[in-house]
Amino acid sequence: MNRAEKAALQLQAVSVLRMLKETRTYDELAELTGLPAGDLNRYVNGHVLPGVERAREVVEGVGRDALADELEARVRFDDEGYVDNSGVVFDQSFLDLVAPVAANALNLERPDVILTAATDGITLGAAMASYFGARLAYAKKSKETAVEDFIESRQRLASGIELTYYLPASAIDDGERVLVVDDLIRSGETQELLLDIALQADADIAGVFALIAVGDEGTNRARELTDAPVGALSSFD
């Protein structure tokens, strides 16, 4: 880990601690993290950065559980099972915290391209792209007028509706590593289309990640399509 990566990890740990501190006293935060309350005070208030190993423990340990809890508190389901996750996908600062936690939890190698679907996946995709220093590409349900060459993936859903996504052919190069991300995975149909686009581009799949998994169908479907890591930050039945 070079100097810049160490500094980024330390700042990520501080961001996680500040988020946790919004709803906790320093004594409660100390109990949660196992760190002294006095040290936590200094980290949260920006007087000093945690050491690299301590920062890693915060991001890789308490970070994932804390973010999953925060995510669950923000997500709403209506009586028909539809998900309202606007409290998450509209909060870029929260999504910026998710990226390093997801990377560590899934043991992801650095991708060249983050691939997602318009529109709700874009903010998560941007956070992941920023963290990895990768390009962001997003597939749309319609073609852009000025683009001549597209990769197209089409599927007829169980409901009889045909779903098609288009990505400019220049967005992914042959042999690049592609990480597929989305805000939500339920049936896995969108992820299957995105994986198909990446494979049509002769790319290598780095993994599949979603903020929210509703049931196991979608993640199981993705695992059948790739040997790369597949996971979600939080799962709902």
Image (spheres, grey):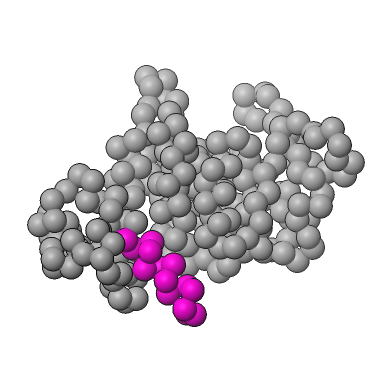
**Residue 119 pos. (x, y %):** 60, 35
**Residue 79 pos. (x, y %):** 37, 19
**Residue 31 pos. (x, y %):** 12, 60
Nearest the viewer among 70 and 18 is: 18
Q: Is residue 13 magenta?
A: yes
Which span is picked out in magenta?
A: 1-14
Furthest residue to the top?
79
Q: Is residue 146 above or below residue 232?
A: above
Q: Residue at x 17, y 56 (%)?
A: 29
Q: Residue at x 33, y 48 (%)?
A: 68
Q: Is residue 234 above or below residue 41?
A: above
Quarter that holds the C terminus: top left
Q: Residue at x 43, y 40 (%)?
A: 91
Say whether residue 100 is left or right of residue 223: left
What is the chief secondary structure element of the magenta stretch?
A: helix
Nearest the viewer among 191 and 124 is: 124
